Image (cartoon, helix red, strand yellow):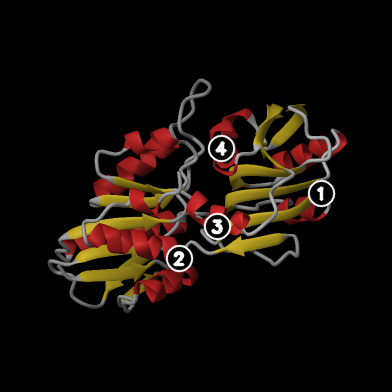
Amino acid sequence: MEIKLFSGSGSQYLADKIIHHYGGAPGDIKLHRFSDGEMQTEIRESVRGAYTFLIQSTFSPTDNLMELLLMIDTAKRASASYITAVMPYFGYARQDRKDKARVPISAKLIANLLQAAGADRVMTLDFHADQIQGFFDIPVDHLKSNAIFVPYLSKRDLSRVKFASPDVGGVKRARQFAKYFGCDLVICDKRRERANEVAEIIVIGDVKDAEVIMVDDIVDTAGTLCKAAKALMDKGAASVKAICTHPVLSGNAYENIEQSDIDELIVTDTIPLKKKLDKISVLSVAKLFSKAIRNTHEHRSISALFIE
């Protein structure tokens, strides 16, 4: 079956690299905007009967999500045989449950929208919560960033390293790295008084003279990471680094990181950085997604790309 790869405007920078590694040519798609901002997507080549991959992350602004939905609908109405929404960053994933009265489960809503638009499959990286896969009634390829971070960390001396979770919710992610490298695990227990504002962090575990690497999936304002880094240094850590998959980096995030005790923040390119910072290292997910797309098209295993 013929394969076609298209990119939304928000993820063009990453889609170009994915398509380059895949070895194909980018599909011809055009985004039109009316004077009031309304969008129209136009696929300017035939996709009839084709295995179609639409690459677009749904980071801010929400136009990226709307554009992806329009791309899916366009491909469906153009008789594409099978449509895969490739979403390196799946936005609204942090709202995955009702944690208080009268709030939405936004991750489920996004899943419904993608399916209603006509997606046959979703491919993404590091959901905020694994259970979001269950919100879909279509196949979901949930790629893991450890395939990116583990080779990078393996080149370093990890003899004094301890892995840490900046909050209780991220313990599973940090434990996977600690188990793989045979290192100890430390937990930072945070208490929030309101969203995006951390009141207190308690370090559980001994970090004296250790080189600590914190592990998280999303770094937004970086408030939690920076306060956790300070708490770790106050407990005697020799240094603190962090690995985070999705660099949302909103508000005063760049200033927070620059002024923090974090030596290095290692992220991926699922979201483009708004500006460069010496402390931030960026690893590309392009090869991982190109391999996943090829394996999906050729009906081969996706789990073969994981590092357990």
**Residue 168's mark?**
none
Mark with earlier residue (1, 4): 4
Q: Residue farthest to the top?
A: 101
Q: Secondary structure at mark 3?
A: helix
- Mark 1: few/some/many CA within 10 Å (<14, 14-19, 20+): some
Image quadrant where residue 84 sits: bottom left
**Residue 151's mark?**
3
Q: Secondary structure at mark 4?
A: helix
Query: Closer to us: mark 1 or mark 4?
Result: 4
* Amino acid, disc 2: Ala
C-alpha separation, residue under disc 3 versus residue under disc 1: 26 Å
Question: Where is residue 256 drawn, in percent x and y?
Answer: 78, 50
| Relative height, residue 93 to residue 79 (above, below) | above
Query: Closer to us: mark 4 or mark 2?
Result: 4
* Amino acid, disc 1: Ser
Mark with earlier residue (3, 2): 3
- Mark 4: few/some/many CA within 10 Å (<14, 14-19, 20+): few
Per the image, the residue denoted by label 1 is 260
Residue found at x 42% / y 38%? 107
Q: Are marks 4 and 2 in contact (CB under 8 Å)?
A: no
Q: Is residue 275 visible?
A: yes
